[in-house]
Amino acid sequence: MDKIDKEILKLLKANSQLTNKEIGKQVHLTGQAVGQRIMKLKEDGTIAAFSTTINYPNQQFIMIYMDSNDFKNFENFITKSPQIDEFYKISGHACYLIKSHFASPELGDFLENLSIWGRYNVETVIKNLI
């Protein structure tokens, strides 16, 4: 990945709806050359997907500390919830990290169900800075 690829990624991250031609003007390439670079970035896995970011009014980061070894059922439970935006298995103090967008009453119910598998810590997003 060279300097131009990094600039293309920066531009796409800021606005994934830019056309190849618009990006090309900013990186001094033709739209076709930009399209070829984007295709290579997709093929090598650097670009996984183009998506929309939704600014939910309620957002949480939930860290899970497993007391149970029933990882498969736990992971299945988490992936079935439509309020889960991101779900990671992590190293460090916690075992999993969840980014979610539950309203208050739903969050309480979800956390009660989580307690079957272990302990948790919830951090609520006050303001998105980026």
Image (tube, grey):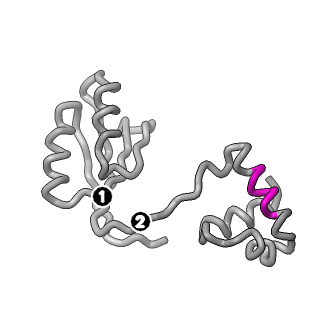
Q: Do the CB atoms of the residues marked 2 and 1 lie less than 8 Å apart?
A: yes
Q: Main secondary structure of the magenta part?
A: helix
Q: Earlier in the sequence, mark 2 or mark 1?
A: 2
Image coordinates for residue 45, horizontal then vertical, percent: 67, 44
Q: Residues within 10 Å of mark 1 (few under 14, many from 20)?
A: many
Image coordinates for residue 14, horizontal then vertical, percent: 60, 70
Q: Quadrant of residue 120?
A: top left
Residue identified by numbered label 1:
101
Three-letter amino acid code of the residue under disc 1 = His
Q: Which mark is residue 54?
A: 2
For the point 32% across and 54% down, the residue is: 100
Residue lying at the far top in this picture: please name it.
Answer: 69
Q: Residues within 10 Å of mark 2 (few under 14, many from 20)?
A: few
How far separated are the C-alphas under marks 2 and 1? 10 Å
Q: Nearer the viewer, residue 96 or 100?
A: 100
The stretch of residues the image draws in magenta is 34-40
Whether 47 is drawn above or below 14: the answer is: above
Asked whether 6 falls inside the magenta stretch, the response is no
Three-letter amino acid code of the residue under disc 2 = Ile
For the point 49% across and 71% down, the residue is: 130
Q: Nearer the viewer, mark 2 or mark 1?
A: 2
Q: Quadrant of residue 69?
A: top left
For the point 81% across and 56% down, the residue is: 36
